[in-house]
Amino acid sequence: MKPNHSNRNKRKHSRIAARHEASPSGGKSGTLHVRIKVIPRAGTVEVRGRMSDGTVKISLKAAPADGKANKELINFLSREFGTENSSVRLVSGAASRKKLIAINSRSKIPDWYGE
């Protein structure tokens, strides 16, 4: 019988979702990692809440074709965190609804993030 590694993987991913490396001065220049589940073709671009594991649900207008939904997600997150698009990077999940995003620099933390 194979061992069940699903709980270990969930713990690993929840640590990644909550991890961010703040600057020593407590500023907002460190890298922030955010786990996201996208809802494409939803009609609005907005945060829909959090899942039980801390993943942020975000609805998007764009369809998941030709990277349009990923581009819309990066644009939305850069506006929400007050940074340039180039500071928001898709770490994993380019072809999945579940994504890991790294935000390198930001001028604000949105209310929905709730560190």
Image: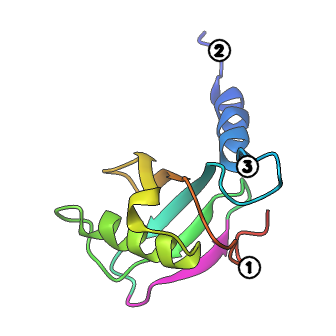
Residue appearing at x 66%, y 75% in the figure:
49
Callout 2 crowding tier (Cα within 10 Å): few <14, some 14–19, many ≥20:
few
Residue 45, image x, y percentages: 45, 84
Is 101 in the magenta? Answer: no
Q: Is residue 49 above or below residue 52?
A: below
Q: Amino acid at mark 1?
A: Asp
Spatial CA span between label 1 and label 2: 40 Å
Callout 3 crowding tier (Cα within 10 Å): few <14, some 14–19, many ≥20:
some
Sequence-wise, which precedes: disc 1 or disc 2? 2
Residue 43, image x, y percentages: 37, 90
Q: Which mark is residue 18?
A: 3
Q: Amino acid at mark 2?
A: Pro
Residue appearing at x 65%, y 22% in the figure:
4
Callout 1 crowding tier (Cα within 10 Å): few <14, some 14–19, many ≥20:
few
Q: Describe the element under mark 2 as helix, strand or loop.
A: loop
Q: Quadrant of residue 56?
A: bottom right
Q: Describe the element under mark 1 as helix, strand or loop.
A: loop
Spatial CA span between label 3 and label 2: 26 Å
Q: Which mark is residue 111?
A: 1
Q: Which mark is residue 72?
A: none
Q: Is residue 51 above or below residue 39?
A: above
State which quarter of the image contains the C terminus.
Answer: bottom right
Sequence-wise, which precedes: disc 3 or disc 2? 2
Instruction: Give the magenta range.
Output: 43-50
Our reading of the magenta stretch's main secondary structure is strand
Q: Quadrant of residue 19?
A: top right
Residue 103, image x, y percentages: 54, 56
Question: Marks 1 and 2: CB-CB under 8 Å?
Answer: no
Q: Is residue 65 above or below residue 108?
A: above
Q: Which mark is residue 3?
A: 2
